[in-house]
Every structure is written in structure tokens, then in C-alpha cells.
Image: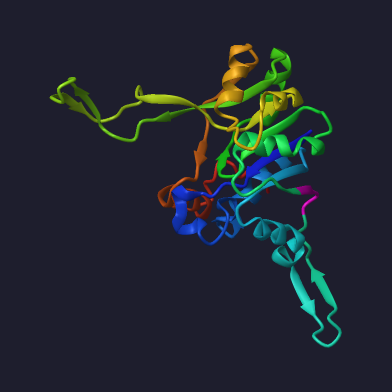
């Protein structure tokens, strides 16, 4: 089963970093967050990836084209140009890098990679989110329910104080957030049947809008609830948080040795 990763957006909400590189190439520790996502799936035995590119796509292509250069010690003979790699740290991955357009929306990106998934069930996620969701249990849940799409749903707590406010704007009460204040969202880490692509019109289709709404209307969407770690990287603060977890060796997604 292939893993499709959406990695083509502009990343405007973390523009301090993304004006230099695509958001999936922003580093956690010394490796791009995209690498962390792929490494996680790989630990479950999924080593074939289709990456949907757009903004500054050449940087992602160059990273994988020169993967051994980035991850190994090297000796270069400057006279002959011979390059020898030492202590190679290559991964057993097959990575297909697809230009899905600069301004294409998420649905359009998925539609453009149809030829690379061979009409088979595939996994789908975003190139800016990390989790410790159990992939095997997620896939079993998907197969058991027999729907076209399974989302990993996560519970995110409200980050601010809670106000009780009248229509006229008068504040009646204020309290700090607690564990009861939350929102259930789509955390990515999806399992898809190829037929979902028939629900997508064109490049201007955001998968999370009309295609997903129509799938829901057709009773073809299930939610696999994950109550463990999940974190996207939309802001500098979130990037710092993920880096702190990594540096302290407390990263929940690091399940490899």
C-alpha cells in the first residue's frame, strides 16, 4: 500500500520559514518534518511514497535525489570528481515525486497522482503533521467498515479562556479552558479507496470541501478516533514545540531505534 503525502502548499501561516523552503522541508532536529512522517510510516512497513509537490518543489526533489549526500559521510576526489559515501544511511524507500501544480488545491493534487497508485487502496496525509497513531489498527478499522474513506480524528483542546457573551456583547462570565473544551478535527493519516478520486472535479477542488462533503452524504466516511499524540506545524510556536520534544528525546512519533 502506497502512502500519498500532500506537500505542495504555500505554508503561509508559517511564512517566517516557508518563504525559504516548502513547509514539509522545515526541520525538526536535523531532518525535514516530511522525513519524520515517512520514517514513521516506514516503521510499520510502508516504504512506497507518492509526494504531491507544488511550491518550491525542486528543493524536495533535490533532497531525495541527493539523499546519501545529505545523510552519509563522503569522500570527494576533486581531480576526478569521484564521490565515495561512507556509513551509508539510506532508507529502503521508493519515492515518487510529482509536480501537482503551484496553486492546485488538495483535491486536485490527489486527482493528479491517480496514475501512481495503481487503482489500489492508499494512505493519505499532510506533510506538516506528526502523530503516534497506530497505523495497523487504523488500516484494520478501515477494512472492517468497508467505506471509501477513513479519517484519523483527534481531539484538540481550546487554547484560550472561555467567554459567556450576550448578543449585545456583554460578557457574563469568564473562565480558563479545561479538558471539557475541545474540538474533534481531521488529523490526516487517512486510508482511501481509489474511488474517492471520482468525487474530485479538478485542480480547484479542496478535498476537505465538496469531495469530502459528498462522501459524507453518501455514507462513505468513517472516523478512527486517536486519543494519543498529534501535532500539526502551522506556526513558529508549534515548530519550536516539536523541536523541543525531539531535542529532549520525548518525541512520541519516534518509534524507531
Position of residue 248 relative to residue 154, above or below, is: below
Residue 58, x across and y down, in percent: 68, 59
Residue 253, x across and y down, in percent: 59, 41
Position of residue 244 relative to residue 114, above or below, is: below
Q: Pick the residue in front: 140 or 236.
A: 236
| x 52%, y 35%: residue | 229
Residue 221, x across and y down, in percent: 62, 17
| x 74%, y 61%: residue | 67
Q: In which quarter of the image is the N terminus?
A: top right
Residue 257, x across and y down, in percent: 68, 49
* Left or right of residue 99: residue 168: left
| x 74%, y 23%: residue | 195
Q: How many labels does the image show?
A: 0
| x 34%, y 35%: residue | 159
Residue 56: quadrant of the picture: bottom right
* Left or right of residue 144: residue 55: left
Residue 63: quadrant of the picture: bottom right
* Left or right of residue 244: residue 193: right
Q: Give the range drawn in magenta.
A: 91-96
* Left or right of residue 141: residue 16: left
Amino acid at each position: 500500500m502506497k502512502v500519498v503525502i500532500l506537500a505542495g502548499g504555500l505554508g503561509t501561516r508559517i511564512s517566517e520559514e516557508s518563504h525559504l523552503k516548502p513547509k514539509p522541508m522545515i526541520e525538526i532536529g536535523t531532518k525535514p518534518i516530511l522525513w519524520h512522517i515517512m520514517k514513521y510510516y516506514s516503521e510499520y512497513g510502508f516504504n512506497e511514497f507518492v509526494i504531491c509537490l507544488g511550491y518550491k518543489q525542486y528543493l524536495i526533489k533535490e533532497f531525495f535525489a541527493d539523499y546519501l549526500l545529505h545523510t552519509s559521510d563522503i569522500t570527494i576526489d576533486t581531480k576526478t570528481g569521484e564521490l565515495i559515501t561512507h556509513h551509508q544511511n539510506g532508507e529502503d524507500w521508493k519515492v515518487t515525486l510529482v509536480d501537482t501544480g503551484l496553486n492546485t488545491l488538495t483535491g486536485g493534487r490527489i486527482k493528479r497522482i491517480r496514475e501512481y497508485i495503481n487503482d489500489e487502496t492508499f494512505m493519505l496525509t499532510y506533510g506538516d503533521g506528526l502523530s503516534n497513531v497506530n497505523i495497523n489498527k487504523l488500516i484494520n478499522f478501515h477494512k472492517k467498515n468497508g467505506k471509501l474513506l477513513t479519517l484519523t480524528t483527534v481531539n484538540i483542546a481550546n487554547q484560550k479562556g472561555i467567554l459567556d457573551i450576550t448578543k449585545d456583547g456583554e460578557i457574563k462570565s469568564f473562565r480558563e479552558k479545561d479538558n471539557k473544551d475541545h474540538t474533534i478535527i481531521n488529523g490526516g493519516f487517512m486510508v482511501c479507496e481509489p474511488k474517492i478520486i471520482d468525487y474530485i472535479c479538478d485542480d480547484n477542488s479542496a478535498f476537505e470541501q465538496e469531495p469530502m462533503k459528498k462522501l459524507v452524504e453518501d455514507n462513505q466516511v468513517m472516523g478512527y478516533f486517536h486519543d494519543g499524540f498529534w501535532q500539526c506545524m502551522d506556526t513558529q510556536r508549534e515548530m519550536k514545540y516539536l523541536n523541543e520534544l525531539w531535542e529532549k528525546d520525548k518525541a512520541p512519533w519516534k518509534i524507531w531505534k
